[in-house]
Amino acid sequence: MARFSLQHGLTALLCALPLAAAHSATVVMAFGEKIAPYCFPETNSGIELEVIGEALAVRGHQLKPVYVPLARVPFEFKYKKVDAAMTDLGEDMKPHGGFYGDPAGVYDNVLITLKHRNLHIHQPQDLDGLTVLSFQGAVKRFPTWLNAVNQRGQYFEQANQELQVQTLDKQRYDVVLSDSYIYRYHANQIEHETG
């Protein structure tokens, strides 16, 4: 697996309401349902949930996570189904009442290729002629890298990031754009399951 880091991080937290320290509140927050190891819906655990939950607890608040497909996270906030969202997927939520806080974490988004392909990606033009599979909303986060690929019809999004690993391994795509920890987590899970 070749790896190239995109010099940008994806902010992981959008706070929807300014919480006063004097009032305890339950904060209903939307999280992507398929972003292990950041969120594990089946156990209400993961890096993001722990960091955000502890930060809220310091002020006497309690986190109530709601899990939805990643692309639905901003919509849940815009339509007032949740108080906060873990991402805006590149859409400004201020017009919808959003208040941005400091990020709870920063994703290590990288372009991943199969080592035996010997692809060298150092600039956006290096993606010419290659198919790219990414997480939802990546084209909004990384337009310099992905707009041309998208316009050529060689850009695809997949909500289930485990499938990113599987399809790259089967050479159905040339490049996967993923957080390095998410990719490694799923690659390790697949290796463990298949032996």
Image (cartoon, rainbow, N blue to C red):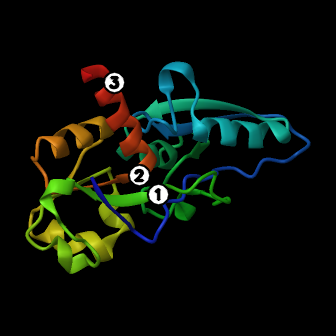
Q: Residue placed at 11% from the left, 41% from the top? A: 170
Element on which disc 2 rests: strand
Q: Point out residue 101 in the picture as x, y percentages from the top left corner.
A: 67, 59
Element on which disc 3 rests: helix
Alpha-carbon span between mark 1 and mark 3:
23 Å
Q: How many numbered markers are drawn?
A: 3
Q: Point out residue 116 in the picture as x, y percentages from the top left corner.
A: 15, 55
Residue kind at label 3, given as amino acid type = His
Q: Nearer the viewer, residue 71 or 134?
A: 134
Quadrant position of residue 91:
bottom left
Residue kind at label 1, given as amino acid type = Asp
Q: Point out residue 13 in the picture as x, y percentages from the top left corner.
A: 59, 52
Q: Residues within 10 Å of mark 3 (few under 14, many from 20)?
A: few
Q: Nearer the viewer, mark 1 or mark 3?
A: 3
Q: Residues within 10 Å of mark 1 (few under 14, many from 20)?
A: some
- Residue sticking out furthest to the right: 22
Mark 1 or mark 2, earlier in chain: 1
**Residue to which mark 1 is pinned:** 108
Element on which disc 1 rests: loop
Alpha-carbon span between mark 1 and mark 2:
5 Å
Q: Point out residue 81 in the picture as x, y percentages from the top left corner.
A: 52, 37
In this rendering, position of residue 64 left or right of residue 23: left
Mark 1 or mark 3, earlier in chain: 1
